[in-house]
Amino acid sequence: MSIRNTKHCCDEGIIFTGCSMTNAAHAQPAGGRRRQVLVNGRRIKTIDVHAHCVVGEALALLDMKVEDQRGPGIGEVGSRRIAEMDEQGIDMEALSINPTWYRAERDVAAEVIRIQNDKLAEWCGTYPDRFVAFASVALQFPDLAVRQLEHGVKKLGLRGAAVGASVGGREFSDPQFHPFWAKAEELGVLIFIHPQSTPQLEPRFKGNGWLSNTIGNPLDTTIALSHLIFEGTLDRFPGLKICAAHGGGYLPSYAPRSDQSLRVAPEMDTGVKLRKKPTAYLRDMYYDTLVFTDEALRHLAAEVGVSQLVIGTDHPIPWQSGSVDHILDAPGFTDAERRAMLGETAAKLLGIPL
């Protein structure tokens, strides 16, 4: 497999977009050794479910360039990626590719997905003790996405699928996506939802603060999860395993409002009868720990349950390079809870031996 530095060439292989996260506060252990993460003296295998890459060959089919994906510093070779994982104390990453192909024609989308999934499988096969991956799927064509998911899981050894938070303005609760959710439930694999901002609000996101991401991404996730709850999708597919990026967006932070909505505005009831109150569904899904304070992590755990939390670093985008220490240092968690968040829960979801 060809892994190239994109400063020279970026048309083949897995490329890890983003900026260098090496800094004085998180210096690599002496001699380049992997950081050993311990909980009360017990070695823990740490598993990061939220880590990105792109495939240059696939981007080219979409008339996109690798260097446009995340600014300077793009093009980390494999050794650099693993070195950064080592210094953070991340033993394994579940790689995903953010969907840029939802508006592509069917033949183009099919080829993009074929290339990406083959490359992801090849990369994971080269480093089986460090990486697993989520399949890419062309959800704008749900029948095709079903086949891609099954092929990715059964033939390529991928551990589920990474999807956006909507497809061309259509919510995932739309019945046209039911076959995809049914296949994911049948296969028992994890679906990782990563937002793509909220394009309808783009004019209001202009200006300082990168609001399309800072606000738009959590909002996108919040809307997606809310529809899955209120439209009965999670009732229809009770065995579905969903993991939401960025701590589930804003939903866990204001969840009880959902329980009051149709009491306050009964005229907005469309007749979908849920099996339980909206907040109860939060404990049926999983969330990464990409929140930024001890209080945010405590509150997320209180709302959704510690058993539903898994590490998310957003590597190599430097939102949070201290995700392991965040879990180790946050007060109020037991050793068993820290072990679960650091890797045990993700191992079960992704089929990774501990």
Image (tube, rainbow, N blue to C red):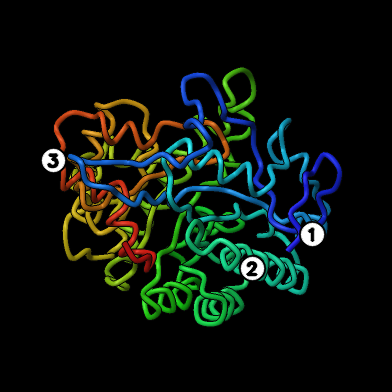
* Of 142 and 158, the residue lying toward us: 158
In three-dimensional space, the C-alpha distance between marks 1 and 3, rounded to whole angstroms, equals 45 Å
Label 3 sits on a secondary structure element that is loop
Q: Which residue is mark 3?
A: 334
Give coordinates of residue 102: x percent, y percent: 66, 60
In three-dimensional space, the C-alpha distance between marks 1 and 2, rounded to whole angstroms, equals 14 Å
Report the amino acid beneath label 3.
Thr
* Of 22 and 172, the residue lying toward us: 22
Is residue 194 toward the left or the right of residue 280 in the image?
A: right
Q: If you read the primary sequence from the N terminus, does the residue marked by circle 1 or circle 3 appear first?
A: 1
Q: Is residue 188 above or below residue 21?
A: below
Residue 88 in sight = yes
Report the amino acid beneath label 1.
Glu
Q: Which residue is mark 1?
A: 57
Q: Residues within 10 Å of mark 3 (few under 14, many from 20)?
A: few
Work out which quarter of the rendered image holds the N terminus and state it.
bottom right
Q: Would you say the residues marked 1 and 3 are in contact, meaning their CB atoms lie under 8 Å apart?
A: no
Q: Which residue is mark 2?
A: 122
Q: If you read the primary sequence from the N terminus, does the residue marked by circle 2 or circle 3 appear first?
A: 2
Residue 266 in sight = no
Give coordinates of residue 11: x percent, y percent: 82, 55
Is residue 21 toward the left or the right of residue 321 in the image?
A: right
Give coordinates of residue 4: x percent, y percent: 77, 50
Report the amino acid beneath label 2.
Glu
Q: If you read the primary sequence from the N terminus, does the residue marked by circle 1 or circle 2 appear first?
A: 1
Q: Residue at x 62, y 55 (%)?
A: 99
Q: Is residue 244 above or below residue 107?
A: above
State how many labels appear.
3
Is residue 261 toward the left or the right of residue 204 in the image?
A: left
Label 1 sits on a secondary structure element that is helix
Q: Residue at x 22, y 34 (%)?
A: 299
Q: Would you say the residues marked 1 and 2 are in contact, meaning their CB atoms lie under 8 Å apart?
A: no
